[in-house]
Amino acid sequence: MLYHVREMREDDILQVTHLEKILFSDSWSQSSVTSSLSQENVKIAVAVSDENVILGYHIFYTSFEEGDVARIAVSPEYRRKGIADALLSYMWEYGVRTGIERVLLEVRESNKNAIALYRKHGFVELGLRKNYYKEPLEHGVIMEKKLDITSRI
Ligand code: COA
């Protein structure tokens, strides 16, 4: 299956919002996705098939030298094909280019697939945020990655 990773555009909003709705209990509304798209400190990458179907997306916040993985998600039928790898690698290139030195994230303790993905990309565990997540209530694992020109997988 052929796809490429590019920056999100306005005509992607409906597809990204749909994926949010089906994948997350705390899904972002269409208006949140829309307003994020125009914010200076938010970068959103999408993986798009040749038929213009969005297979996955990654929302990344920046604040000076720090980045934050706010979301990464891949449509269930396209998982385990390297799409999350490609989305993160795209963001590391962007981060290195724009002077990001450190990336943080929180992830549900039970989300073993995402934790494996983040470890593969060089994140290490810093600690736990107790009962950080609701519905269902769960601890969040805090992870950190140092970003430099060798940051790639
Ligand atoms: N079991 C074990 N490891 C897994 C895994 C699974 N089911 N899925 C991904 N990984 C890890 C592996 O380290 C894998 O590397 P490998 O293939 O060399 O073993 C690495 O992630 C990259 O896999 P990739 O195929 O790029 O991941 P993906 O495109 O399937 O997407 C998620 C991974 C986590 C984004 C996807 O499962 C998803 O959308 N989950 C629901 C949303 C979510 O929980 N997002 C994270 C919190 S915001």
Image (spheres, grey):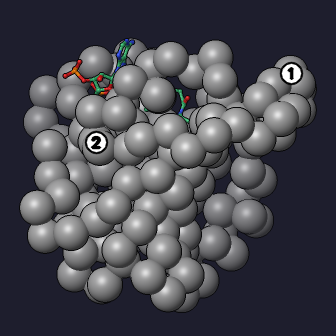
For label 1, the SS is loop
In this rendering, would 77 be left or right of 29? left
Depth check, front residue: 52 or 47: 47
In this rendering, would 103 be left or right of 138? left
Marks 2 and 1, the one that precedes in the sequence: 2
Asked whether mark 1 and ligand 1 are closer than 8 Å, the reply comes as no
| Rendered position, 62 above or below 92 | below
Identify residue for label 2: 121
Ligand 1, seen in the image, is in the quarter at top left
Residue at the (74%, 64%) spot, across then down: 32
Identify residue for label 1: 136
Task: Locate residue 65: give its quadrant.
Answer: bottom left
Q: Position of residue 141 (x, y in %)?
A: 63, 35
For label 2, the SS is loop
Q: Position of residue 100 (x, y in %)?
A: 36, 77
| Rendered position, 120 above or below 136 | below
Residue at the (28%, 42%) spot, across then down: 121
Task: Locate residue 108: give its quadrant.
Answer: top right
Amino acid on which the number 2 mark rests in the picture: His
Residue at the (55%, 81%) spot, across then down: 63
Depth check, front residue: 99 or 7: 99
